[in-house]
Amino acid sequence: MEARLDYNFTERGPLRMRVTPYVEVFHQGIEAAREFITGRTLYTLNEQLQYLMADKRPVGGWVFDREGDMEKPAGHLVADSLEYAPPFHLQFRTLDDITKGLEGMAKGKRAIARQSLAIAYCLQGNAESALRVLADDVNAVKANPADIAHERLPRYTELFGLQFE
């Protein structure tokens, strides 16, 4: 398991920039399978740092004004990253830990988390659960054979032996 901080920068006018940090966790087996299935690696799971914090101060605390004090928001960003990122990523030491975390994150429109969860289940030999997670992709292919899932689902079969309807 590896972890990293990834920062997204959003302009808030010509002289202002807001930074949104993400804590990302990588599992080598999941990312190797994702690369085979999709042609690229991403991250196994992630979360915005501000959602890990009880204090929502960073919404304003991570805004950099080119004509203002850069040290204060930089100090907040570093301190918050050091305080909240490790407790998040350190809870995901094993594939079982990652799978449990993904089960909560894979709901809704978090497609990367659902894909990671399906792969995690496959790596654990739990084909039935993987098929349940991939049900939306199967339905998308049935509704539209041109959907990207049409290219990806056979790779799950090739890699893990999953059998789709």
Image (cartoon, helix red, strand yellow):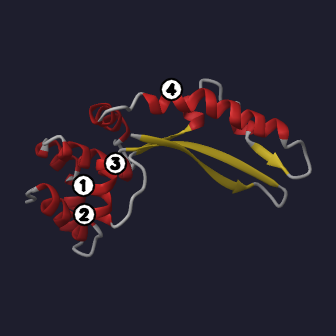
Locate residue 128: give its quadrant. Answer: top left
Q: CA distance from mark 1 to mark 3?
A: 25 Å
Q: Which mark is residue 140?
A: 2
Disc nearest the viewer among 4 and 1: 4
Q: Amino acid at mark 1?
A: Asp
Determine whether the residue tagged by mark 4 lies in a helix, strand or loop: helix
**Sequence order check: which comes first, mark 1 or mark 3?**
3
Q: Amino acid at mark 2?
A: Ala
Q: Give me the residue at 69% from left, 38% from top.
A: 59
Q: Which residue is mark 4?
A: 87
In the rendered view, tell whether residue 35 sits above or below residue 145: above
Pick the quarter of the image with the C terminus: bottom left
**Sequence order check: which comes first, mark 4 or mark 3?**
3
Q: For the residues labelled 1 and 2, say whether their Cβ atoms are less than 8 Å apart.
A: yes
Disc nearest the viewer among 3 and 2: 3
Q: Give me the residue at 65% from left, 25% from top.
A: 55
Q: Nearest the camera: 67 or 96?
A: 96
Q: Which residue is mark 1?
A: 136
- Asked if residue 111 lies left or right of residue 121, the reply is right
Q: For the residues labelled 4 and 3, say whether their Cβ atoms are less than 8 Å apart.
A: no
Pick the quarter of the image with the N terminus: top left
How far from the left and from the top, in percent, is residue 114?
Answer: 31, 48
**Sequence order check: which comes first, mark 4 or mark 1?**
4
Q: Residue furthest bottom?
A: 146
Disc nearest the viewer among 1 and 3: 3
In the rendered view, tell whether residue 105 sits above or below residue 10: above
Q: CA distance from mark 4 to mark 2?
A: 37 Å
- Asked if residue 102 lies left or right of residue 52, the reply is left
Q: For the residues labelled 3 and 2, say whether their Cβ atoms are less than 8 Å apart.
A: no
Q: Residues within 10 Å of mark 2 (few under 14, many from 20)?
A: some
Q: Which residue is mark 3?
A: 28
